Amino acid sequence: MNEPYTFQTNLLHNKHKIDPTTGAVSVAIQHASTFHQKEIDSFGKFDYSRSGNPTREALEEVIAELEDGYRGFAFSSGMAAISTAFMLLSKDDHVVISEDVYGGTFRMVSQVLTRFGISHTFVDMTDLEAINKAVQPNTKLFYVETPSNPLLKVTDIKAVSDLAKKHNALTFVDNTFLTPAIQKPLTLGADIVLHSATKFLSGHSDVVAGLAVVKDPALAEKLYFLQNSFGAVLGVQDAWLVLRGLKTLHVRLEHSVKAAERLANFFAGHPLVNKVYYPGLKEHPQYDIHHSQAASAGAVLSFELRDEDVFRTFVENVEIPVFAVSLGAVESILSYPAKMSHAAMPAEERAQRGITNSLLRLSVGLENPEDLIKDFSNALEKVKQTNLNDDRG
Ligand SMILES: *Cc1c(COP(=O)(O)O)cnc(C)c1O
């Protein structure tokens, strides 16, 4: 398009808003696995759907534009996107990676890549000195998740990308928590942005999908080779669902971020809450860095309740959010990192990182925040009643 419209408008008015052959205002779902070739010596644009499919391509083009990248790739899950991107590495390479990275990424790096001779060092990515110390002569990749999961620690994307360039290494950023509506890592120096599109991008808890966006054409060609070689591509129905979900990304996040800010303040002021992790709170240790690289604090926060008894009573009495893994949906989702997203992490490593047994993560949905506050107040009120009864008994 000629005009530089805003992200909000571009979500709807992109190259794929009208089907060029029928005028349909929704991308057609192309189920074909194979495509008839008219000539013997030169094949058409599409030949086989693992290698390329028009519906998947629409999604890949849309996400590439939204992330300000060169080329996008859609995978069958966030982990498929992440794992395929890791295949850019070779035997004897080394990865420097956020210590409180997503549990599935932790598992991939620590239990799968190691079998192929790819080593790693987990570091506190908020600490540039620690990152520097972790670098080895064979370091080829800096892997960042910011804000991290579940403690919402913030990494300076530009500083890490600069360091990576100095060492001739790549920078990958998992942008699942914020999406390009809030943060665009490629504009800050990252080479590849990764997504679990299962979360905010699709937004309705009804599809599992992954995306990658690359900035450099030569690197994009390498990732395309791997996508086609490994073959963990996204199915067309699911590609369509992600495209559908993307249209409301801006309005969903606008509501949920505002609600998350209110809830973070509510929890921060509650006597039964030890600690709130949310980059929207002034006391967040990387508040300034976060707001220099992201447009808002996002819709995910974590909070630690006073102890495990309080935690149990709270979870048993909360009514509105679903108690489940995942995040980034229309309904609020309350998760228990120790037993859910980070179950793949050994207990002592969890404890070391501050992922205690009374820590909860909340992904704020589209409910009226007043109702959520009422629900959470009531559940915490039950703790006091239970305690009183215990004292009497
Ligand atoms: C969910 C998630 C993933 C994994 O994505 P899947 O779609 O479940 O495979 C990766 N990173 C983050 C931050 C996530 O929340």
Image: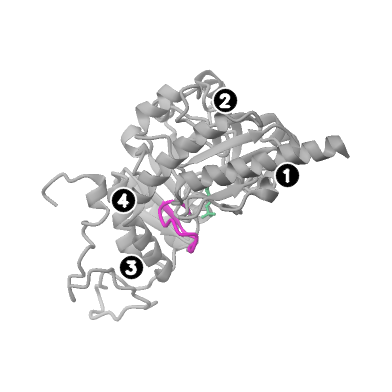
**Residue, disc 4:** 64
* Mark 1: secondary structure: helix
Give whichever of discs 3 and 4 has the lower sequence position. 3
- Asked if residue 91 is among those painted magenta in the image, a careful observer would answer no
Q: Is residue 206 magenta?
A: yes
Q: Residue furthest front?
A: 392
- Of discs 3 and 1, which sits in the foreground? 1
Taking the spot 62% from the left edge, 41% from the top edge, the residue there is 360
Labelled pair 1, 4 in contact (Cβ < 8 Å)? no
Residue type indicated by callout 4: Ala
Q: CA distance from mark 2 to mark 4?
A: 31 Å
Compute the Cα span from label 3 to label 4.
14 Å
Q: Is residue 326 visible?
A: yes
Q: Give above or below for 164 relative to 29.
A: above
Residue at coordinates 69% horizontally, 29% vertically from top-left?
352
Q: Compared with residue 76, is residue 152 higher up or lower down, i.e. above or below?
A: above
Residue for badge 1: 312
Q: Residue 187 appears at what percent x and percent y?
A: 31, 36
Q: Name the residue carrying label 2.
A: 134
Mark 2 vs 3, N-terminal side: 3
What label does residue 55 carry, if any? 3
